[in-house]
Amino acid sequence: MAFYYAMASAADARVIIVGMPLDRTSSFIPGARFGPDVTRMAADNIESFSPYQKRDISDIQVHDAGNLTFTYPTAAAPLELIAATTGKNFAGGARQLAIGGEHTITPPIVAELAQRFPDLCVIQYDAHSDLRQDFLGERVCHATAMARVLDTLPRDRLFQLGIRSFSEPAEMSEPNLFPFDVLAPVERVRAAIGNRPVYVTLDIDVLDPGAMPDVQTPQPGGCSYRDLALSLAGLAGLRIIGCDLVEVCPRTMQPSAGAATAAELVRELGLLLTNAQ
Ligand SMILES: [Mn+2]
C-alpha cells in the first residue's frame, strides 16, 4: 500500500514519504505505530489538489518508501536508523516527509539535517511544548522531543505554534512560543526566519481533539483544521528542507475521519516541500 500519487521512483523523487512507526514511549494512549498505515488508507479518498496552496501534489515527483522496520537491540537503535535514513534520502537529492509514530522521531532527523545546514530553524505545531528534560525517567521520549531538538539548535531557532500544554509556566513567556493560535503568528515567524532553511514538525494534536480525536495525548482548546491548513499554506516560499507529521494514533484500523485529516495534511506538507528553492 502506498499513497496513490506517490508513483515516482526513489531516484526520480523530489519528495520521499517514509513511515516511521515508532511507538515505544507512549505514556497515555498507545497506537501511533499504526499512524502511517491508516494515513495511507485514508489518502485514497483525498483529492490531490490542495485548495489551500492551490497546487496539485500529483504534479510533483513523490516516492513512498514504505515504513521503517525498527528493532530494539538498544533504545537508541531506532533513532540511529531514523538519522541514517534521513541522511540517505537527503544525499539522494530528495526532501523527506516522515510520518510517525511518536514525536521522538523528530530530534534525530533535525540533528542529521543540522549537520548539513548549520543555520537550520524548526517550526513546531503542537498542543504540547515538549520542553521537559526528562519524563517518567526517560530523556528521549515523546514528551521531551523539543528539549532534544534544543540539544542541537539554539533556543531562538525553534518556533512553537498552537501550544497549550506547558511543563513550566515560564514557557508561556518564551518569545518564540505562540500559545493557542497557529494562524496569527505566521507573518512574525516568516520574518524571523527569512531565507534560512527550515524543518517543519507537525504534531497532529495541535488540532482540537474535536477535529482530530485520533491522537496519543488529546488536549482541549486546539485550532481548527482550516486554521492549520491556512497556517501551513502561509509558510509557502520559506526554504523548507524537510518535515514530519507525528502522533497520528488511530482508534480504528479503518480509514476514519481522523485518518482522513492526517492524509490531507500529508498532501499539504508534500506540496510545501516543493514550493520554493
Ligand atoms: Mn503533542
Image (spheres, helix red, strand yellow):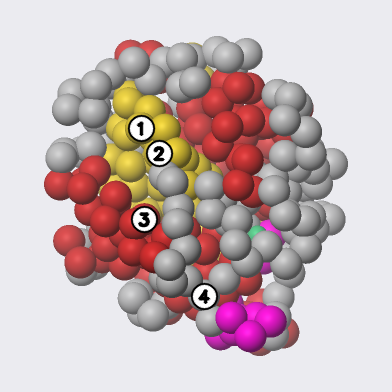
Q: Nearer the viewer, residue 139 or 174?
A: 139
Instruction: Please report whichever mark, 3 or 2, sits nearer to the chain's N-terminal start.
Output: 2
Q: Label the magenta part by its dominant secondary structure.
A: loop
- Left or right for 9, reference 75: left
Residue 18 bears which disc, if any? 2
Q: The residue tagged with tag 3: helix, strand or loop? A: helix
Q: Which residue is mark 3?
A: 82
- Left or right for 182, reference 72: right
Q: Could you tell me if the residues under marks 1 and 2 are in contact, i.e. CB atoms within 8 Å?
A: yes
Residue 240 bears which disc, if any? none
Q: Residue at x 53, y 47 (%)?
A: 21
> What residue occupies the far front of the structure in this picture?
73
Residue range of the region highlighted in magenta in the rendering: 127-138
Three-letter code for the amino acid on which mark 3 is drawn: Ile
Instruction: Please report whichever mark, 1 or 2, sits nearer to the chain's N-terminal start.
Output: 2
Is 135 included in the stretch rendered in magenta? yes
